Amino acid sequence: MDIKNSQIVVDEWIKNHGVRYFNELTNMAQLTEEVGEVARIIARRYGEQSEKESDKSKDLGEELADVVFVVLCLANQTGVDLQAAFDQKMKVKTERDHNRHQNNQKLK
């Protein structure tokens, strides 16, 4: 599913199941919370912190999907066409960063 369709799916879900969007500040707080859950998994599973037994069953994919869901909510409620914004960002990054990363000795 592309981003544009994902925004539509989220909007339909909100209308059919969620009553309404939480306000933008609430969604920003939720996004921060979800990113924190991703960070916790990454820090413990791939970083130097030990993973607690209670964290071993956490699904990184599910937590990343939570982040995407809230981002799509924020895009919808603020009128952002996230597909267009993402496509533009990829164009900019490709033009700006291609040689920079290719020539970065730290990445070799």
Image: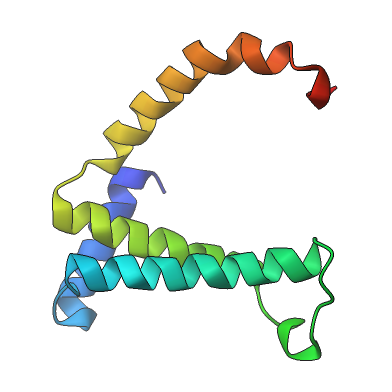
Residue in the picture at 81% in, 24% down = 106
Q: How is the image coloured?
A: rainbow
- Please tell me whether residue 95 is drawn above or below residue 29 in the rendered image: above
Q: Quadrant of the C terminus?
A: top right
Percent x, y of residue 97 = 56, 17
- Please tell me whether residue 33 is drawn above or below residue 1 in the rendered image: below
Percent x, y of residue 82 = 29, 42
Residue in the picture at 14% in, 76% down = 20
Using the rendered image of the protein, determine whether residue 96 is visible from the camera's viewpoint. Answer: yes
Percent x, y of residue 98 = 60, 13
Question: 100 or 58: which is nearer to us?
Answer: 100
- Please tell me whether residue 96 is drawn above or below residue 7 in the rendered image: above
Residue in the picture at 31% in, 65% down = 28
Name the side, left or right, on which 55 lies relative to 17: right
Query: In the picture, residue 60 is in which quadrant?
Result: bottom right
Percent x, y of residue 100 = 64, 13
- Please tell me whether residue 96 is drawn above or below residue 78 in the rendered image: above
Residue in the picture at 57% in, 73% down = 37
Question: 91 or 10: which is nearer to us?
Answer: 91
Question: 14 or 53: which is nearer to us?
Answer: 53
Name the side, left or right, on which 67 lies relative to 63: left
Name the side, left or right, on which 45 lies relative to 100: right
Query: In the picture, residue 12 is in which quadrant?
Result: bottom left
Using the rendered image of the protein, determine whether residue 9 is visible from the camera's viewpoint. Answer: no
Query: In the picture, residue 52 is in which quadrant?
Result: bottom right
